[in-house]
Image: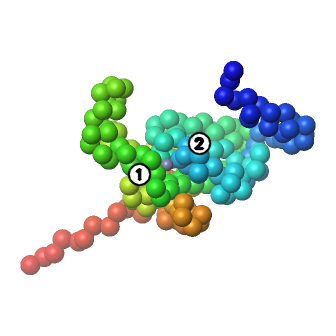
């Protein structure tokens, strides 16, 4: 018997409401959400994302991986093809407090997991979300600097606090190619 049984009963209730009928593939909200697969961080709950509203990609930590970049590139190219003059969307990268990827910062846990899976330990260490403000800044930068994505998109970064339930914007929306370069102190002449 499938563990999905209880949820399949909910599906019957859902289908009976007709909420699925007549939805367009084009998202109603001009956003693309990247967040963690943690069951506590469902954008349908904490952002009120409704059916047909927005594409959502969820993975461990809500990290901007190559796969996520490819997904953003695909959806933005698809929308650009369907509506050439239309606006594109803002990618909202959302990390959260208390993320379970923090276990990857533990050397023993990381070593055992790497040994079990063959995954690279250094790469695993980089996946940990310990300081969500820092990782979300890095991931916004990673997406903005990818040549794969349409230059018309914008990218913003946020942290969702599990304690307060509030989302705080950490990085204002910016577009690829218009990224402010990291400031470096001018050389001091003697
Ligand atoms: Zn998480």
Dot label at residue 106: none
On screen, residue 19 above or below 43 = above
Residue at 69%, 21% in the rendered image = 1
Colouring mode (rainbow / by chain / secondary structure / one colour): rainbow
Residue at 69%, 29% in the rendered image = 4
Front label number (2 vs 1): 1
Residue 93 in the image: x percent, y percent?
53, 53
Residue 182 in the image: x percent, y percent?
34, 63
Nearer-the-camera pick, 72 or 39 = 39
Among the 4 quarters of the image, the one containing residue 18: top right
Is residue 142 something that shows in the picture?
Answer: no
Beta carbon at label 1 within 8 Å of ligand 1: yes
On screen, residue 9 above or below 152 = above
Disc 1 target residue: 129
Is residue 102 something that shows in the picture?
Answer: yes
Residue at 46%, 40% in the rendered image = 65
Callout 1 secondary element: loop
Residue 41 in the image: x percent, y percent?
59, 51
For this orientation, the residue located farthest to the left is: 190
Q: Which class describes the residues within 10 Å of circle 2: few (<14), some (14-19), or many (20+)? A: some
On screen, residue 141 above or below 171 = above
Q: Earlier in the sequence, mark 2 or mark 1?
A: 2
Question: Looking at the rendering, in which quadrant would you find the C terminus?
Answer: bottom left
Please state if 159 lies on the left or on the right of 12 as rendered.
left
Disc 2 target residue: 57
Residue 40 in the image: x percent, y percent?
59, 51
Q: How many numbered marks have been drawn onto this rendered protein structure?
A: 2
Q: Which class describes the residues within 10 Å of circle 1: few (<14), some (14-19), or many (20+)? A: many
The CA span between labels 2 and 1 is 17 Å
On screen, residue 38 above or below 47 = above
């Amino acid at each position: 018997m499938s563990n999905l049984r209880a949820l399949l009963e909910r599906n019957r209730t859902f289908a009976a409401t007709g909420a699925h009928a007549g939805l367009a593939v084009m998202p109603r909200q001009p956003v693309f959400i990247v967040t963690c697969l943690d069951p506590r961080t469902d954008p349908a709950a904490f952002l009120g994302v409704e059916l047909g509203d927005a594409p959502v990609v969820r993975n461990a930590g809500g990290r901007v991986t190559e796969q996520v970049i490819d997904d953003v590139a695909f959806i933005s190219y698809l929308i650009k093809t369907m509506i050439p003059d239309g606006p594109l969307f803002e990618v909202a990268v959302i990390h959260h407090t208390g993320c379970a990827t923090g276990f990857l910062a533990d050397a023993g846990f990381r070593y055992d997991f790497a040994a079990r899976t063959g995954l690279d330990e250094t790469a695993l260490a980089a996946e940990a979300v310990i300081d969500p403000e820092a990782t979300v800044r890095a991931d916004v930068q990673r997406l903005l600097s990818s040549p794969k994505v349409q230059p018309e998109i914008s990218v913003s970064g946020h942290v969702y606090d599990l304690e307060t339930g509030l989302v705080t914007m950490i990085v204002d929306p910016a577009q690829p190619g218009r990224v402010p370069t990291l400031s470096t102190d001018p050389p001091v002449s003697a």
